[in-house]
Image (spheres, rainbow, N blue to C red):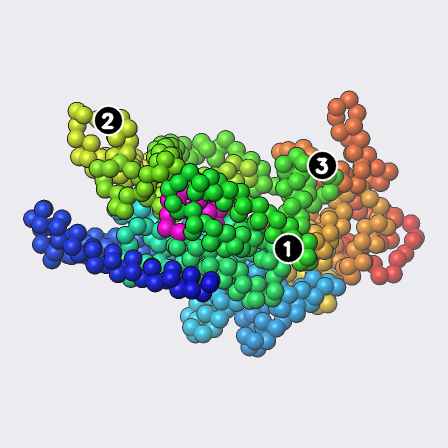
Amino acid sequence: KMSSGAADLRQRKKQNCTESDKMAPEERNKENSKLGRSPKYLLIQRFAKLFFGCLAAVTSGMMYAVYLSTYHERKFWFSSRQELEREITFQGDSAIYYSFYKELLKAPSFERGVYELTHNNKTISLKTINAVQQMTLYPELIASVLYQASGSEEVIEPVYFYIGIVFGLQGIYVTALFVTSWVMSGTWLAGMLTVAWFIINRTDTTRIDYSIPSRENWALPYFACQVAALTGYLKKNLNCSAEKFCYLLVNASTYTFMMMWEYSHYLLFVQAVSLFLLDSFALAQTEKVHEVYRIYLFSLIVGYLLQFENSALLVSPLLSLVVALMLSKSLQMNMKKSTFVSRLLKIMYIYLVLTVAVTLNFLLKMFIPHKENEHLLKFIEVKLGLNTTKNFTMNWLLCQESLQAPSQDFFLRLTQSSLLPFYILVLIICLFSVTQVIFRRICGEPLKETVKLEDGRIGERPEIVYHVIHTILLGCLAMCLEGMKYLWTPYVCMLAAFGVCSPELWMTLFKWLRLKAVHPILLALILSMAVPTIIGFSLWKEFFPRIMTELTELQEFYDPDTVELMTWIKRQAPVAAVFAGSPQLMGVIKLCTGWMVSSLPLYNDDDLLKRNENIYQIYSKRSAEDIYKILTSYKANFLVIEDSICNEVGPVRGCRVKDLLDIANGHVVCEEGDNYAYSKYGRFCHEIKMNYSPYVNYFTRVYWNRSYFVYKINTVISFQS
């Protein structure tokens, strides 16, 4: 039955495509005869519009990529630096990603390099990891293959090739946003405005300035391509060839996005919820929506197999929701009749899908062993106030700026660029129009096959409704966690630009206002050109000089203390040495020297999280013997203490590393409303610098500068004072 139903569905889709292809020329000929235009004139006009629009989209992407490259060069003086100084610009987890890219290039063959990464025992002491699975290193695999296969060894240095790919992807990101806004509004003027807002608000639209190799910088361009293709796929009256192209692009971009980022399935879950709501109110073709569900399902299966049987994908909410929707598919297809019973069943259908999805997810988590995302659930509990904890890792995460609620500065920046006011205006108009359409559907009124400009019903276009729901859901997440703004703000740029450039949106507003003095269609067409032009000129006048100043102003990033530390390690430390210190510094040491470390800045593995917490104890008030036992348990030979952490004066008291350690260790005493740290031992990072017993019995200082103190961990302990 399922196979016959699927065959009927495919046959129905083919018939719809054929009918629309046949009807389109007839409708065009009627319109042309009314306007006195020949089909040849219309063909030339459409070709010119498409050509110049594509040219503008590609040019925008290329210019943005060049802009990022130029800004990066000005910021770091990259071309004039030595290799070591360049590598120091990669901080934290970025250093780890790039270090594995280097290892792949140094391997005698690609196959050998992949094997060494999947059985890696040269990075973290006493631990063998599958780095490809644990760190989602598919971008590095692809970059290394392209670098070697293209014969770029003699043309460009590996670091330039690597960051060049990332900057190129950012160009594709901007191009995809351009195309999405263009497809929705019908004018590439909206795409230009989208790009302008995106670049002006770069601080809030991308993390490319702070962390070039981060997974989202590799993954989000593919998601933007998927959204652009999905926007076209959801449109009504799409000809068959365009629909197939959009469908194939949605397929390819979804698979790629799933492989590039370990948290991609969460973002796809938000998208699936948007499509589920869109379909539940019968605002889109059910066949198209369910085709997208199948793409999700197949992507999860492929991702599970290629990511070494990643159990996190099996227990993901996306899989549970998609399976629940597929199980309820036959029920949904029988509820398209405009009767009271069908409308009642529609409400039950939504309840049924949600119940099945939650139950299925609970059962999967019960029977499938998984540990990857347990810390995320604990974090959400504490973040929502459902639980309290003294755990160092949880409190450290809660103190991170990206996991705080967005600051007022964020909204101020969006308002100063005029983005937020226009987004709110567009969102309100679209929401009211969608609400009207939903009310009409509840009353049994069918949707129009073709929505004309004079109808003023922008809420009947499924691609618009999808984007409204999608931005609202992403906006809710961004209001809780500032780090989510990098997912939300780009689509705010796109939706706001579409709205001010869309005659349909202005016509919808004028229909409500019932304008009589001026012809509403004429006024809508004028405003859809005039408003974005005025916005564009104002943005050019205010922000273009700032952008040019960024590109012409030479900044200086120089960290001589870190350079000296890395140089000393490479010259003086034994090859088999293991270094211990803060995870962020260990990532840089691994990249710049290749030496083994005791911890890494990774937060998706419980064992590594525990390691990080234990090694951070060097900044706590514990005895020399305790610290010695911790470090030797990980076979560490050298300890690196950072003065910036030991003497940290943070803006928020209680969020410094040493404060969090005192809370976790129970070294905090409350007196008269104030908290005081108390322990019978002094703070280890301070006491060890005094060079007195018992600290000198366990540790010997071998190197220091203004920022770092390096101690050799004694293998033979001397208890002489």
Q: Is residue 492 left or right of residue 515?
A: right
| Count of numbered marks | 3
Q: At which x and y percent is residue 323?
A: 53, 55
Check disc 3 and report the residue beneath it: 388
Residue 635 in magenta?
A: no
Relative to residue 258, is residue 269 depicted above or below? above
Disc 1 or 3, which lies upstream in sequence?
A: 1
Looking at the rendered structure, the kind of residue marked 3 is Thr
| SS state under label 2 | loop
Check disc 2 and report the residue beneath it: 514
Closer mark to the observer between disc 1 and disc 3: 1
Looking at the rendered structure, the kind of residue marked 2 is Arg
Check disc 1 and report the residue beneath it: 364
Closer mark to the observer between disc 2 and disc 3: 2
State which region is magenta. 271-286
Q: Which residue is drawn at 46% across and 70% down?
A: 147
Contact, CB < 8 Å: mark 2 with mark 3? Answer: no
- Corner quadrant of residue 594: bottom right
Q: Residue at x 26, y 61 (%)?
A: 18
